[in-house]
Amino acid sequence: MTAVSSRDDTLRRRAEAVLSRHTPTEVVRLPHARLQLFAKLESANVTGSAKDRSAIWILGDAVRTGAIRAGTTVVESSSGNFALSLATYCHELRLDFVPVIDPNINDMTERTLRRMCRRVEKVTERDPTGGFLLSRLARVGELVREIEDAYWTDQYSNPAGARGHYELTGTEIVAQLERIDYLFVGVGTGATINGLSRRVKEANPDVVVVAVDVAGSAIFGAEPHRRLIPGIGSSIRPPLVEDAVISEIVTVSELEEVAGCRRLVRDHGVYAGGSTGAVYSAIECYFEGFSGPPPVVAFLCMDRGDPYSMTVYDDAWVAANFAPSLVTTTGQW
């Protein structure tokens, strides 16, 4: 056995060990007047977000197929959580990782990435949509060409990312809840709603899958424009959305996203990130005035609120970027 193949064999064993240590996240019931409302706490994953599921599966799949070998440099465009997941698992696999980020990244996340990664690329030029995604993807393309033996995980198109949510997130939630009438899922790269919706639909054929997006996102055909809060929405339509099982779409504004975060922590003690606030706001809007037997409604608490403490949960930031008149007392949220 050559030195290279021996190192690759060690890498495969490490990847298998990382996946074997994965543990399910808890589902909790949140008190609600009209619904049987359940939140799956993806914030309890190792790095604090649901992105761990897709990161584990993408890396493991690439190692198994030989696309990633010992010495490969992993490259990815990410607004935050997926980069943190990759940084953590690449560290365990002894692989270099280069995240490509932009100015919308939370300060806490950026500081963490710069401590964990030897190289961080930050684009600052907006693309034609007013955002940074296309600029980040262009830089990823340059890095893949520049770096010898580079591998782009491609969270927007890689079916292994969706498979991670099918096999892990989806399999867990159907075991934890006997019935799901409505499943609300925030959409960004499309991996979560792709894998989760297909698995839940298999177990609950009548489930209504509601995709949640934010204003300014182009995922479902709207014109993209500038957005401030990372973690949900996109300036492109990710290919992984195509195979998702989607019954309905609810779009909320970023201000409603902020309000949803604050109501969730005020009413339920769940301190979550922006995408979770958007989903909670969508649920409240969707079931406004609803009467009848309370349906079983499930959603993911995608990540923790800590990285958003200086944005979504900061009155001064919200006032400066959205509506100063609404940020007078905490009670209004």
Image: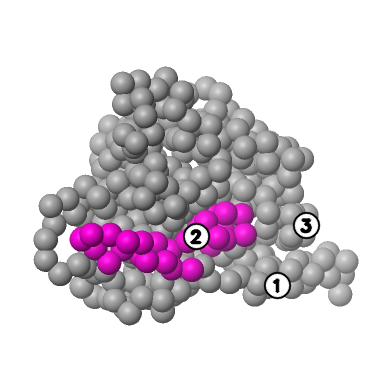
Residue 64, position as x, y percentages in the image: 64, 70
First along the sequence among labels 3 and 2: 2
Q: Three-letter amino acid code at disc 2?
A: Glu
| Disc assigned to residue 94 | 3
Judging from the image, the colouring scheme is one colour
| Disc assigned to residue 17 | 1
Residue 106 visible in image: yes
Query: What residue is rendered at 74% in x and 60% in y?
Result: 92
* Relative height, residue 261 to residue 125 (above, below): below
Q: Please, what secondary structure does the residue beneath circle 2 have? A: helix
The tally of labels here is 3
Whole-number angstrom distance, CA of label 1 to CA of label 3: 13 Å
**Range of the magenta residues?**
26-53
Residue 123, position as x, y percentages in the image: 58, 28
**Left or right of 289, for residue 28:** right
Whether the magenta-drawn stretch holds residue 44 is answered as: yes
Residue 131 visible in image: no
Tag 2 residue:
42
Q: Are marks 1 and 2 in contact (CB under 8 Å)?
A: no
Nearer to us of marks 1 and 2 is 2
Query: What residue is rendered at 62% in x and 37% in y?
Result: 108
Dividing the picture into quarters, in which one does residue 326 lie? top left
Quadrant containing the N terminus is bottom right
Nearer to us of marks 3 and 2 is 2
Query: What residue is rendered at 65% in x and 75% in y?
Result: 20
* Relative height, residue 25 to residue 133 (above, below): below
Q: Please, what secondary structure does the residue beneath circle 3 have? A: loop
